[in-house]
Amino acid sequence: MNSQFQLISNRMNKNISRTQAAGLHFNQTMGDSQMTKLKRLTEFGVIAAMLAAATLAACGGGASTTSEGIQQTYTTTAGVGEVMQFQIDTTNLTYTYTIVGTSYAASGVAVGQSSSGALTSNRDGTYAVGVSADGFIHSGRVRPVRAMFVGHVVIDTIGGTERIPVFGLSNPITTVAELADDFNFEGFSCNARGIANTFGRGGCLAHYGTSNIDTAGNYAICVGGDLSDTATHPCTTQLSGTLQAVAAYPGVFDYIGSGGHIGWLFAFTAANGKKIMVVDHDDQVSLRHEFGHSVFTSSVALNSGDADGHYFVKNNQSGEHLVTIAGDTMTMTLHPGVTGTLAYNSPWNGMVSYDIPASGVTAGTSGIAMAAGTGVYTSINDDDPTRFAVGFKYR
């Protein structure tokens, strides 16, 4: 099975042309005019909303809105085909990483390798990541709450000098049966290893869709469509496979397709009973290899006001920004002085369509985001088919 996800717009009531190819294989060559447009737009960000009114409390035992006093281990995806456990101690200002799964054994990266380094506290709630004692991690910037963290790291061995997006969850689900649910998802993948910054990369593509997992660990994927209503939102690609627990690392599951291992999966259950799930793509067996990550959330309907709050967001193009949601409106630091609009449950339940108008300084933008009241935020962008953003509500 080829697990290459594709971004195919199914948005209703919009006639936005999305630069991408249909089907399992993506073979896009960007022309000069497209590249010029992308360069103009790359700083103009991605937006949308998520989280229920009690989001952080729902994120597993009262997640803190600050990172003060956090001593937590997160199962973490690095968006190049890498899974690690990342322990953050904001009291003693230290971190420790341990490799759980890797696409880079040929480059000398080994499962089980581990080292530590220092954190430096920043005034904005983020932490600078110092060089690890073994030199594997060169630098980084992360922002944690107790349930999750988001940020980037620089790992010369696998991503060169680019910032690799990282997203981690604490206290992961440890049994296959607990994973069972219906999900929405968004993410990105590239057809080669080591692409930490997707801007202008023809072999990279963002994607969205729906999925379900049964209690036996069988999964189904509907790329670009809604499994609960395929007549209205048909799948552009359908995939299936099974999950198997990784014995050495409870809470990590082998993501198996028809040809064998194609990634790793881990998930977290929020206090409201809804789930956040991550697939780290490590597809080295299909016709088109796939490396990146996708974030899944339980599929639930949203109402205006459910997503109100402030969000810290990182994307796969070295970008970082803040978002504020108030009812059906939003503002963001990449578009100062401009108020955008949100359409909840569009194109289907739990998804959010967003539009930000142009200003005298910045171009307008639009796209689709994911919301489920679980404490995580994701979005993709109509203007750049490679960009994927993930973040969380910090207050």
Image (spheres, rainbow, N blue to C red):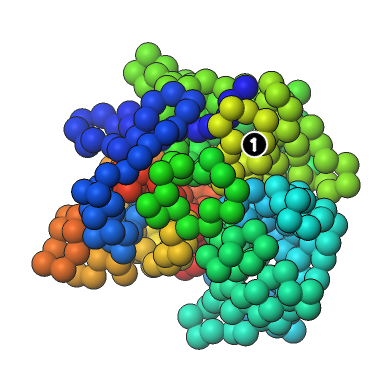
Q: Relative to 193, is 101 on the left or the right?
A: right
- Amino acid at pointer 1: Asp
- Residue at the extreme left: 360
Q: Image quarter for residue 327?
A: bottom left
Q: Residue at x 59, y 84 (%)?
A: 121
Q: Residue 89, percent across and down? A: 73, 76
Q: Is residue 29 left or right of residue 135?
A: left
Residue pictured at 75% horizontal, 39% vertical: 253
Give the left or right position of residue 316, taking residue 332 as reference: right
Q: Position of residue 372 (x, y in %)?
A: 49, 44
Residue 7 appears in the figure: yes
The residue at the point 76 percent across, 66 percent down is 97
Q: Position of residue 22 (x, y in %)?
A: 39, 26
Front residue of 246 and 101: 101
Q: Is residue 137 above or below residue 20?
A: below
In this view of the protein, can residue 347 be seen by the observer? no
Could you say whether the residue bearing mark 1 is in a helix, strand or loop? strand
Quick one: 311 or 224, which is closer to the camera? Answer: 224
On the image, which quarter does residue 65 sit in? bottom right
Furthest-top residue in this view: 231
Q: Residues within 10 Å of mark 1 (few under 14, many from 20)?
A: many
- What residue does disc 1 label? 283
Residue 207 vs residue 109, the one in the foreground? 109
What percent of the width, then of the height, locates residue 16?
Answer: 22, 36
